[in-house]
Amino acid sequence: VEQWMALSWIQILLGENDAAMSSLLELKNKLDSLPAQDNLRQIALAHLGRIIGFVQGPRQGKVHADQLRLTIEQATNGLPAADMLIFQSGMQEVLDKFDELSQQSQQAKADFVVDAKMKAKQESALIQNDIQRNEQRLADLSPESSRLTDQFSADSAALRTQSQPLQQQLAALRGQVTNLNFDLQVVYSDLVIQQANLANTTDPRRRFVIQNLITQIAFAARDIESQIFTSGGQIRNLEMQLNGLLRQQQVVSDQYQTAKARLGQEEQALKRENARNRKALSKLDEDPKRLKGEASSLATQLTQFSTYYRFPVEIYRQLLLDRLN
């Protein structure tokens, strides 16, 4: 009896439904040799009922209707009322549990769908708000970039306006210094000539005239040197002012480039974030597929025989060993 019970149970687990029906009939034949009050007989009858109930309910349609009807007729043929009650109780136990679990799974699925859709709706609203906010910021970046460029152009123009007269003054002074240096060389040459004339002249009156001329030439040289010195100071002062303006221009340019780079980085970051958000939205749209997978998982549990009846394999294994011994 135990062997046929175990075999039919294993066959049901493996999906060998037709073979299980044959094993049930063999089990029924073995029961005929057991006394009516035998505990094993009662356990086996309940086992018969559970498998029949399982094939009628959770695994409905897996066994041909005629074969199932014939199996039930042969399995219950000649059973006393008490045995029939045990058989029917085992069968009804599985069917009742199947109905209960079916309702629970349907309700659980309905609750899950409602909850998932609500959460998806809330998450979708949050993501769409993020996308709209980012799109608005992206729209603001263009005029902000234009304002930044306009400000840079205005600041650069103002600095050029300040530097142009200074450059003109510097050019004029440098030209003036060049001319003064040329004049100074002429004066120095004239001074050398007059000093040579003085050295070659012994006439007192002529020497007096030459000495006066040398004195005048020396005064003229010192005057030119003074002008060159003054112009050099003015040139250095103008160069310092122009260098200051150049540094300001560099600062303005660096600030502009940094701000432009920051706007560019922000633009790319916003676009990447919106791409991720749209991908997340598309995944939310795939929720029905995920819900279908959840429903399939619940249906699989409903069709597992172990959900309704756990066959005590180890107990019957030990009984068999004891009998063999």
Image (tube, rainbow, N blue to C red):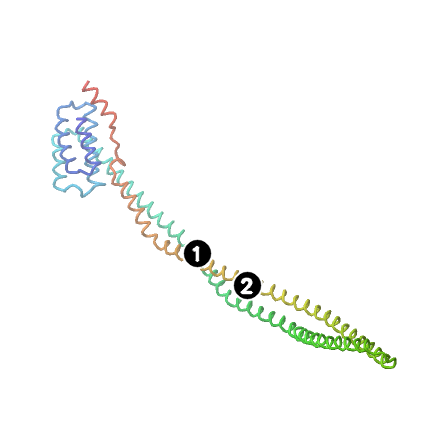
Residue at 52% across / 61% down in the picture?
261
Q: How many labels does the image show?
A: 2
Specify the amino acid type for callout 1. Answer: Ile
Quadrant including the C terminus: top left
Using the image as rendered, state which of residue 31 and residue 165 is in the foreground: 165
Q: Residue at x 21, y 38 (%)?
A: 54
Q: Is mark 1 on a helix, strand or loop?
A: helix
The local crowd at label 1, few if under 14, some if 14 to 19, many if 20 or more residues have their Cα within 10 Å, is: some
Residue beneath the point at 17% across and 26% down: 1
Residue 212 in the image, given as x and y percentages of width and height: 84, 79
Residue 264 % position (x, y) = 50, 62
According to the picture, the residue beneath numbered tag 2 turns out to be 257
Earlier in the chain: of badge 2 and badge 1, it is 1
Name which residue type carries label 2: Gln
Q: How far apart are marks 2 and 1 (CA)?
A: 33 Å
Secondary structure of the residue carrying tag 2 is helix
Q: Is residue 92 left or right of residue 166?
A: left
Query: Where does the image place residue 257, in percent across and percent down from the top left?
Result: 55, 63
Q: Nearer the viewer, residue 321 or 20?
A: 321
